[in-house]
Image (cartoon, rainbow, N blue to C red):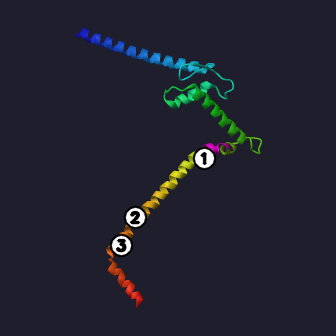
């Protein structure tokens, strides 16, 4: 009986060691991928090597790391990585050009907010749309309620009741 308990404890220990070993191997593989991305070359989604392009505005590893944080361990093609890098460069260039139009010698947060307005305006428009749609839905419900009340009142009053009003006006 005591031997069985000791064997079970050893089996549990071995299983835990295997789990820890598997987790360590997974972490090592992730670290290797991150190391490869942070060096002069990036790994594309298909496993092919892509050299770091000096013409890109940002280090590829930085862009890939940010994208991978939000794509939940999905593979990303090298074309998407390059396109994202170029797009971010265009956005930075556009914002910087707009901030450079300030009439002062120092770029302040007001200049930054003005320059980023086209990129944040869509979010504000969406909030405004939700507000207007909500208001219209409320008005629609009010109108439907008034229509029901109107129809209920005239359903109670017969046509003959209204004809009395017409006769008294003619007299």
Cβ–Cβ below 8 Å for labels 2 and 1? no
Residue 70 in percent (x, y) is at 52, 32
How far is the residue under mark 2 from the one under mark 1? Answer: 36 Å
How far is the residue under mark 3 from the one under mark 2? Answer: 12 Å
Give the label on residue 153, or none: 3
Q: Secondary structure at mark 3?
A: helix
Q: Is residue 116 magenta?
A: yes
The residue positioned 45% from the left and 60% from the top of the image is: 140
How far is the residue under mark 3 from the one under mark 1? Answer: 48 Å
Q: Secondary structure at mark 1?
A: helix
The residue positioned 32% from the left and 12% from the top of the image is: 11
Which numbered mark, 3 or 1, is in the foreground of this view?
3
Residue 150 in percent (x, y) is at 39, 70
For disc 3, the neighbor class at 10 Å (few under 14, some 14 to 19, many from 20) is few
Q: Is residue 13 above or below residue 157?
A: above
Give the label on residue 97, or none: none
Quadrant where the C terminus is found in the figure: bottom left
Cβ–Cβ below 8 Å for labels 3 and 2? no
Q: Which of 102 and 169 lies nearest the eye of the viewer? A: 169
Q: Mark 2 vs mark 1: which is more N-terminal?
A: 1
Magenta stretch, main secondary structure class:
helix
Quadrant of res 99:
top right
For disc 2, the neighbor class at 10 Å (few under 14, some 14 to 19, many from 20) is few
Numbered range of the magenta stretch: 115-119
Residue located beneath label 1 in the image: 121
Quadrant of res 82:
top right
Q: Which of 157 and 119 lies nearest the eye of the viewer? A: 157
Residue located beneath label 2 in the image: 145
Residue 69 in percent (x, y) is at 52, 29
């Amino acid at each position: 009986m005591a031997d069985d308990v000791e064997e079970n404890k050893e089996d549990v220990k071995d299983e835990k060691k295997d789990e820890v070993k598997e987790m360590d191997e997974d972490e090592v593989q992730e670290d290797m991928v991150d190391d490869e991305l942070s060096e002069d070359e990036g790994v594309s989604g298909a496993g092919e090597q892509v050299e770091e392009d000096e013409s890109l505005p940002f280090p590829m590893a930085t862009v890939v790391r940010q994208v991978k944080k939000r794509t939940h361990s999905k593979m990303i093609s090298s074309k998407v990585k390059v396109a994202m890098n170029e797009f971010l460069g265009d956005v930075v260039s556009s914002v910087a050009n707009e901030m450079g139009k300030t009439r002062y010698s120092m770029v302040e947060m007001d200049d930054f907010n003005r320059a980023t307005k086209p990129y944040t305006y869509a979010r504000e428009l969406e909030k405004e749309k939700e507000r207007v749609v909500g208001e219209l839905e409320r008005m629609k419900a009010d109108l439907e309620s008034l229509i029901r009340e109107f129809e209920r009142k005239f359903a109670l009053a017969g046509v003959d009741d209204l004809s009395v009003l017409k006769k008294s006006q003619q007299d």
